[in-house]
Amino acid sequence: MTENQTPLARPLRGIVPPMITPLADHDRLDHSGLERLVAHILVGGVHGLFILGTTGEGPSLSYRLRCELIDRVGELLAGRVPLLVGITDTAFAESVNLAEQAADSGAAAVVLSAPYYFPAGQPELIEYVEHLVRELPLPVFLYNIPSLTKVGFELASLRRLFELPTVLGLKDSSGDMSYVHRVLRLIGDRPDLSLLIGPEALMAESVLMGAHGGVSGGANLAPRLFVELYESAVAGDLAQVRRLQARVMELDATIYSVGRHSSAFLKGVKCALACLGICEDAMAEPFQRFGPGERARVREYLEYLDLGIATHASVG
């Protein structure tokens, strides 16, 4: 274990935000914004931090920048919460390289989805994960996001892969509650495995059903809101869950809905963070930040939502 590494509880529980990557331009980190963002998220009482996932634009970033981000976030966290690092790539060797960088920087685990160019059959996907985990210096969360990878982890594949001693569980972003219930049944007799939920609208419902937490993108903006929602679900406080869930759904109806394309969520969150003065909102190609009209709408929504977020001077 490195000096900055936090031990990872099994199962991992709580809110683990998938951090956006603050960029000054398409291949350069916004270092001061990164410091403010990490501090902002930690103040919310989160239980871990996940970088280089979908919300972090991981596959769109250069390997140099990914390694720089891993190293800097490890320094900023200084072991205060576990760091999870996305290593999904089309190249086997690059996934290994990213995992090694993560281990050197104090990460507690890595996160792996199916390779996203050649669609693997389920036997091929099993072989791929079995071969890769033997090369990795850290334990692994599998990441099910078939909308972006073409291939999801079927239940029979998970049953096989959960037998691997370094597989910690699953982050599911399928949005399929039937699948969530089936995974919960699969891990019912495995108290060491975690099921973390990606779609934030489904996080509380899933936790009430037995899931272990959420990888909620909105926790970049309002980490305390998602932590309180998770805690209310764990406590079975349905009235509080309903109240806080309504706040989460307001984010979806406002800031996440400004854009016209599937990039709307990511652009909205980044723009909101810039409006709050936390970090720049530059995007990795092929996307560009919101223009003045969309930015003005995001500002209006932030005022309407009144999330109680501590703000800084506006960026940009």
Image (cartoon, helix red, strand yellow):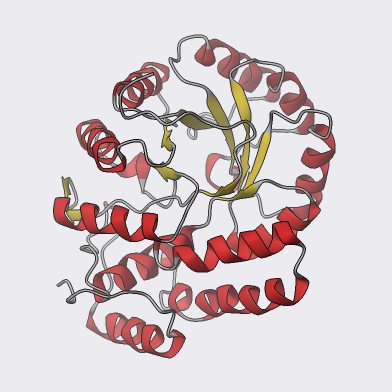
268 lies above or below 75: below
Q: How many marks?
A: 0
| Residue 62: image location, x then y, percent | 24, 36
Front-lying residue, 270 or 94: 270
Instruction: Look at the image and tell me whether residue 262 can be seen.
Output: no
Q: Quadrant of residue 70?
A: top left
Query: What residue is rendered at 42% in x and 31% in y?
Result: 6
135 lies above or below 299: above
What quarter of the picture does the N terminus occupy? top left
Is residue 308 toward the left or the right of residue 121 in the image?
left
Front-lying residue, 221 or 58: 221
Query: What residue is rendered at 55% in x and 80% in y?
Result: 250
| Residue 289: image location, x then y, percent | 26, 67
Front-lying residue, 160 or 37: 37
Is residue 246 toward the left or the right of residue 58 in the image?
right
115 lies above or below 201: above
| Residue 284: image location, x then y, percent | 27, 52
